[in-house]
Amino acid sequence: MRSAKNAAGPYTDGELDTLATRIWEWLGRQVDESPVVAAIERDESQPNRRWFLRVHGEEKDVFSIWFHLGQRTLSYETYMLPDPETHRAELFEYLLRHNRQLYGASFAIGEENAVFLVGQLDNRMVDDVELDRVLGSLYGWVERYFRPALRLGFASRFHG
């Protein structure tokens, strides 16, 4: 439990270590208990605390969800699509209109104009229930929006 003095401030290294252990244990349970989680891995190349889950979907066969623990927030993201080849404006409008329906994440344009789902959670809110919500939400949104986004952004590959 954090003291009132540190309630909104950055986490200390010790607090981050404790939270990182809690997240790692949750991740381990996902591999054991969730039929959609195939694997977890720590990113040892980063000085910060970073992990990813490999997830099996139906609409998008496999995708990864990255988690990065910072001093104040746990950030998460998943790659949706590469830079669209067709109907860019329509695709971005479609995703932006659906951002209003998402809780805790949003569609964003990232490196090389790829489309991502990104979000963050205040470290004080990180617990098993919130981590379950994040995983379930990202999984559901990938399943719901991947195929329509793919058909807009790569329409030429679906005709002929």
Image (tube, helix red, strand yellow):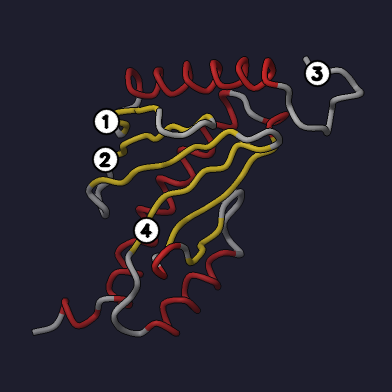
* Residue 38 numbered tag: 1
- Distance of mark 1 from mark 2, alpha carbons? 7 Å
Which quadrant, please, contains the N terminus?
Answer: top right
- Residue visible at 31% across and 38% down? 55
Q: Which residue is mark 2?
A: 56
- Which residue matches tag 4? 80
In the displayed structure, 146 sits above or below 4; it is below
Indicate the amino acid at tag 1: Ala
Q: Residue at x 29, y 80 (%)?
A: 85
In depth, the one of 27 and 8 nearer the eye is 8
Callout 2, which amino acid? Answer: His
Q: Secondary structure at mark 1?
A: strand
Amino acid tagged 4: Met
Label 4 or label 2, whichever lies nearer to me, is 4
Name which residue lies at 69% across and 18% down: 15
Please name the residue that numbered disc 3 is placed on.
2
In the image: residue 118, left or right of residue 112: right
For label 4, the crowd category at 10 Å Cα-Cα, with few meaning under 14, some 14 to 19 and many 20 or more, is many
| Label 3: how many Cα within 10 Å (few below 14, some 14–19, many 20+) | few
